[in-house]
Image (spheres, rainbow, N blue to C red):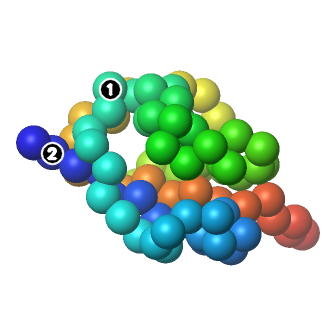
Amino acid sequence: MEKLTVKAFGIIAEKLPEQEFYFPQQQDTEELLNSLYDEYPDLRNMDFSLAVNQQLIQQNTRLRGNEEIALLPPFSGG
């Protein structure tokens, strides 16, 4: 069974047991987020962005297998 590599950064990482972990394969990012919220309820109350294979995403994205998922805290830039 394929797995996703999930990496958490900043304040998000502080709310999880590990900064990097494997998670069962999901169909898409919406399903992944729901599963992460079930597993780690504290995430529901946090703002964060999601990146798939180092690409920030703004909408539901299909997952094909073995992606690297990043949970990124809010950041300011300029």
Residue on which the image places disc 2: 2
How many numbered discs? 2
Dot 2 or dot 1: first in sequence order is 2
Q: Quadrant of the C terminus?
A: bottom right
> Image check: 49 left or right of 26?
right
Residue on which the image places disc 1: 27
State how far apart marks 2 and 1 are (Cα). 11 Å
> Image check: 72 left or right of 17?
right
Q: Residues within 10 Å of mark 2 (few under 14, many from 20)?
A: few
Query: What residue is rendered at 60% in x and 69% in y?
Result: 13
Q: Secondary structure at mark 2?
A: loop
Q: Secondary structure at mark 1?
A: loop
Task: Please state the horizontal and vertical placement of residue 68, each as a whole percent of the image.
Answer: 36, 57
What amino acid is labelled 2 in the image? Answer: Glu
Q: Residues within 10 Å of mark 1 (few under 14, many from 20)?
A: few
Toward the viewer: 17 or 53? 17
Q: Is residue 69 visible?
A: yes
Task: Please state the horizontal and vertical placement of residue 24, each as a whole percent of the image.
Answer: 27, 43
Task: Please state the horizontal and vertical placement of residue 61, each as a whole percent of the image.
Answer: 46, 29
Task: Please state the horizontal and vertical placement of residue 46, each as a whole percent of the image.
Answer: 76, 49
Quarter where residue 57 is shown = top right
Toward the viewer: 9 or 38? 38
Query: What residue is rendered at 36% in x and 64% in y?
Result: 21
